[in-house]
């Protein structure tokens, strides 16, 4: 199998050391780990691991620029991006690599992590995530973060033909992708909102699905990872409300307005493919058409 570069952007993260240790406990193939420290940290910096590289920035350059930087440093054919508060299934690196095509982005089965116990919070898991409708969100025009889809997870749980299955979105905390596809086709992360809310899932999912390569967003249920849901006191990446609003606005308008010139599909093609999805009303086409008319000159 090919080398996997596990990239971990981090900003003053309490559980970074434990996350890196878990990678080395669970990865079974040829891998390296590249940690990006975004500004100073008060917590322990991982060391004394083989094939570990630490990249330090004196100031916070933003999550997405850091991901780009780490991906360019990667020597593996594949990259697995992880948040710095995650736990992994044994052999996750080889399992994900065994069932991937070069125009896919793949995520493992998702659990919630109890970081203090370093164990699953409970037995609940999520295999599917949906794209949230920006027309129905009471807090404004945006792709709301999250989008857990427990109904579809339950419907397809025990049918093994769905062990590797297409999903509209991922959770931004863990994803596996061919390095060349990420950097040279998707183009990495654009710098329209480097300091804003990450919005990794809609950006990666929609560029993968709408682009000229027939890409897919997939879940591989043969392995898993667990992610700690953060609260304000534990969150490494902090943003002002304005930065977060800017990021939501930028990417909702970018994709709902079909502004990506390299796409071969418009956004309605993607929505129709996965309907019915939660939060999308029956008249979503009418809402989209009205939005297009109102923003035709922008």
Image (tube, grey):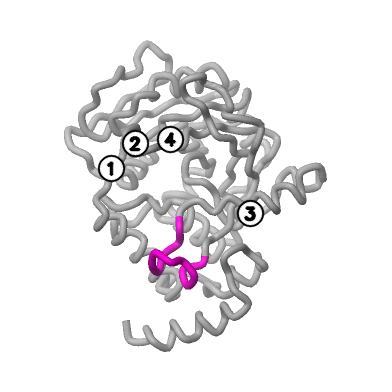
Tell me the residue that label 2 is attached to: 235
Instruction: Using residue 22 as the reference point, say whether residue 35 is left or right of it.
Output: left
The reply to whether discs 1 and 4 touch (Cβ–Cβ < 8 Å) is no
Tell me the residue that label 4 is attached to: 83
1 or 160: nearer the eye? 160
The reply to whether discs 2 and 1 touch (Cβ–Cβ < 8 Å) is yes
Tell me the residue that label 3 is attached to: 167
Q: Position of residue 66 (x, y in %)?
A: 31, 41
Q: Which residues are magenta?
A: 133-144
Q: Assign a secondary structure to mark 2.
A: loop
34 or 160: nearer the eye? 160
The reply to whether discs 3 and 2 touch (Cβ–Cβ < 8 Å) is no
Instruction: Using residue 2 as the reference point, say whether residue 151 is left or right of it.
Output: right
Q: Assign a secondary structure to mark 1.
A: loop
Tell me the residue that label 1 is attached to: 238
Q: Assign a secondary structure to mark 4.
A: loop
Q: CA distance from mark 4 to mark 3?
A: 20 Å
Q: Position of residue 119 (x, y in %)?
A: 56, 23
The nearer-to-camera label among 1 and 4 is 1
Q: CA distance from mark 1 to mark 4?
A: 14 Å
Q: CA distance from mark 2 to mark 4?
A: 11 Å
Image quarter of the N terminus? top right
Which is more N-terminal, label 2 or label 3? 3
């Amino acid at each position: 199998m090919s080398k996997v570069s596990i990239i971990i952007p981090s900003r003053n993260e309490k559980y970074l050391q434990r996350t890196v240790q878990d990678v080395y406990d669970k990865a079974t193939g040829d891998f390296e780990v590249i940690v990006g420290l975004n500004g100073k940290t008060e917590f322990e910096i991982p060391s004394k691991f083989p094939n570990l590289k630490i990249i330090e920035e004196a100031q916070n350059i933003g999550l997405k620029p850091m991901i780009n930087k780490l991906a360019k440093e990667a020597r593996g054919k594949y990259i697995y991006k992880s948040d710095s508060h995650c736990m992994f299934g044994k052999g996750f690196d080889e399992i994900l690599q065994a069932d991937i095509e070069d125009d896919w982005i793949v995520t493992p089965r998702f659990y919630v992590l109890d970081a203090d116990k370093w164990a699953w919070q409970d037995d609940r898991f999520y295999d599917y995530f949906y794209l949230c409708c920006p027309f129905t969100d009471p807090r404004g025009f945006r792709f709301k973060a999250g989008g857990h889809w427990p109904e579809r997870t339950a419907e397809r749980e025990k049918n093994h033909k769905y062990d590797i299955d297409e999903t509209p979105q991922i959770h931004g905390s863990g994803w596996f992708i061919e390095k060349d596809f990420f950097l040279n086709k998707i183009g990495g992360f654009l710098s329209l909102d480097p300091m804003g809310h990450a919005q990794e899932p809609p950006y990666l999912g929609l560029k993968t699905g709408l682009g000229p390569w027939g890409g897919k967003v997939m879940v591989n249920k043969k392995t898993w990872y667990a992610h700690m849901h953060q609260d304000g006191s534990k969150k490494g990446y902090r943003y002002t409300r304005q930065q977060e609003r800017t990021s939501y606005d930028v990417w909702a308008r970018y994709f709902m307005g079909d502004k990506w010139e390299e796409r071969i599909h418009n956004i309605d093609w993607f929505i129709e493919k996965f309907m019915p999805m939660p939060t999308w009303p029956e008249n979503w086409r009418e809402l989209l058409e009205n939005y297009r008319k109102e923003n035709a000159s922008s």
